[in-house]
Image (cartoon, rainbow, N blue to C red):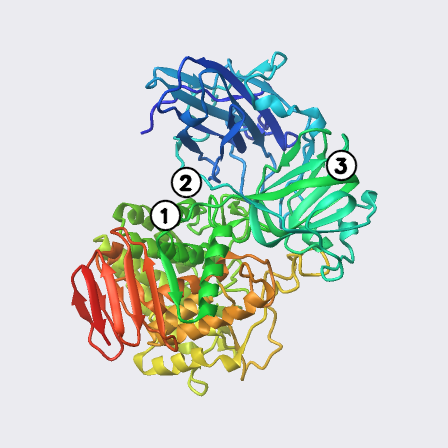
Amino acid sequence: MTTPWRGQWIWAQETGIGAPAPDNPMNGVLDPAYTDRRVLFRRSFDLESVPDVAPFRITGESRYVVYVNGEELLRGPIRHGQRQLHYDHCDAAHLLHPGRNTIAVLARFYGNRTAWWLPTPPTFTLGGGCLVAELRLDDDQRVIGTDEQWLYQEPVAWTPSAPLHTLSPQIPEVFDARKLSRDWTLPEFDDADWSKAHPIPSLHIGGTGRTTPPSDPYGAILPRPIPQLTASPTSATRWTTRAAKVGDGLASALTGFDLDADTWESSAEKVSGLIVADFERIVSGTVRLTLDAPAGTVVTGALVEVPNPAALSSAQTFTYTARGTDDVFETQDPCGGRYAVLLSDMPVTIEALEVVERHRPRPSGPYFTCSDDALNHIHAVGLRTVDLTAHDAYIDCPTREQRAWTGDSVVHQSVDLVTNPDWSLARWHPRLTARPRVDGLLPMVAAGDAADPELVTIPDWSLHWIRSVYNLYRYTGDRELVAGLLPTVEGVLRWFTDFLGSDGLVHEVTGWVLIDWSPVQVTGTSAALNALWARGLADFSAMSDWLGDAGRARWARGLQDGVRAGFEVFWDPERGVYRDHAIDGTVQAAVSEHTAAAAVCADLIPEERRALIRDFLLNRDAMLTRSPVQAHGSDADGAPTAAALFAPPDPDWDVHGQVIGAQPFFRYVVHDALALLGAADRIAELCHDWDQLLAIGPTAFRETWEGGSFCHGWSSTPSRDLITYVLGITPAAPGYERVRVAPRLGALEWAEGVVPTPRGPVRVRADGNGVSVESPVPIDIDLPGQETKSLGPGTHDIPR
């Protein structure tokens, strides 16, 4: 249990809680008119001397930025479930000084759901905008906690805004700097006209009205389980301008804009109209604009993937009205993109345009390098893509949605586990996502608008989530962590049994069966979905056995055996491959590598067919890839639409000769399958497929081979596989009690790298002469054509 709170819940006099509805007298309800509200808080105090340590913690609903004596201390909170908050915590001593000190907080309540926030069902009083904080001084003898001594003001500088639309629910930020002093965070600021904050008792049926945590609707508030994000400013590098009518808006100004036709400069001085700034790579964070402009100058802007009107339909836009002096503006919500687009109604000088990149930390130590420079580049871009999509959760993309999709994250997590010594996000994300609906299935998104249990979900995304729990079992060996997640895993697997037929297969599974951004045929009885379910059953049985639960392991293996028997219906002996689906008992002709790969990973393939399936997966000439997102979003001519994205089209290709190939996301399953089939030596070659992504986006990997967002973490599989399969470093026992080293270089001359483990780094170098290993744990060496050797911890050179 954490130290008892002395700080009280506070807010302005008005909160976002309205009168209870007549049909719901047991709870408070949110006032739909109370949206996008900001409240400024201040608390000043005197110190004779600065303590060595000054612990500070804070949480609230929905966002806050904390300043101490005008310097930013931290931002929060992390995204959270509807009845859960975590508090941010740090040492504030370095920002304190003898004399007058001030803590200032810019707090914000969204009201409208966003991609990363869902409102909490409130009590009669708490949940419609709230803040609690405390600073502990002099060995906890003095606590500066939120109470009526804190002052607040509801600023008029921001104009409340509504989300753009459902697909990308960004909330535009509209800020008039003339209506807010820049000094409001400083001790010398005159706050005489500010009001006293209002402590909030949590009133509900059976409640005692306590004003401090823990209290409903949030329950126990636990410390943030992941580090604060880093803050690293990145400046735009080149500029171009063109005349534009400000009254027509930014989208109109961007119509017909040609990146290649305009002249680029090194700065933007005394310019008006449209201004486009290039960061020359995808960046993610908060936009910070420093300008010299007359008071009242209005600058509208956004950070986008490409500067065209369609990009604005899913971008985080802002409108800034200059105060005429000390004009520095930084957006509150994060965003991503490569180009900043600005529209000014008067001549301005842009003194600085930065994105303060806010990523989770990546400590040094692990690395990968090999004799192929192109693969080295692919590996590095994959790491950059994961970092751009790893904040307080693993998200799909920073440039559009910022949703923490339940299934996408298995790739981000897999990359982190082999490349990042800090596993806190890899451990936290599966827990954040483990919030099942009442029927046991997971929502398709964690802690955001699409996490609403009333929405349809993606059944197979819950199965990919199971694989992320299995990764925790293999890599961390943390029994308490895995055991805590296993009931949710079981609930997901049992959800599918309602669709179970006498043939051992699940049929007509409801929801949005996606599989991949490829037109895999899933109508009726989906072979790929059955195989993914069987893989989940296998993962569950392995974890249950490890935890000593033989009964549940036996239950799962029995269902997996049933799928294995029923799966024979999909086998096509003439083509030597498994077909994709059956409608009303009739197996259709369409074929994909998804079905074959998932079947291998689920151990559904008889031994005598393994060579056939290996050859099938390696025959890339027959593969056809096509994505419904190739004409979706900022690379399209119009605004994004979700209308055509929910079901694969009927085949218009040669289903008897062509094979639907995997998009970058599902390639993690394909590569897993090839390794199981003894073809790990081909994976380095297959990673060169990512060359085509570099050709269209050289600084981050795109969502699909054909299009989609320009930065999608699920496309980073090579950054995992070059280590796990090419260099061949994997856990030989849960938690790396032993390490397996099985390099399969293929055409590479050499490869080397370091991976993190709970017991210290493992270093491997492999070349034509053999392998050298430095390991803190026992080693299983698996070289082609040799029996596996077991070695003790230490440094070893093994000749080929």
Residue sitting at 26 percent across and 52 percent down? 760
Q: Spatial distance from mark 2 to mark 3, Cα to Cα? A: 37 Å
Report the label total: 3
Q: Spatial distance from mark 1 to mark 2, Cα to Cα? A: 9 Å
**Disc 3 residue type (three-letter):** Val
Residue sitting at 38 percent across and 30 percent down? 220
> As rendered, which of 47 and 632 lies closer to the eye?
47
Q: Which residue is mark 3?
A: 298
Above or below residue 230? Residue 18 is above
**Disc 1 residue type (three-letter):** Asp
The quadrant holding residue 216 is top left
Which label belongs to residue 449? none
Residue sitting at 64 percent across and 57 percent down? 642
Quadrant showing the C terminus: bottom left
Question: Local crowd at mark 1 within 10 Å, few (<14), some, or many (≥20)?
Answer: some
Above or below residue 588? Residue 697 is above
Residue contact at pointers 2 and 3, CB within 8 angstroms: no
Q: Which residue is mark 2?
A: 227
Question: Local crowd at mark 3 within 10 Å, few (<14), some, or many (≥20)?
Answer: many
Locate residue 381, reporting x and y percent: 49, 60
Q: Which residue is mark 1?
A: 422
Locate residue 554, reporting x and y percent: 25, 61
> As rendered, which of 3 and 344 lies closer to the eye?
344
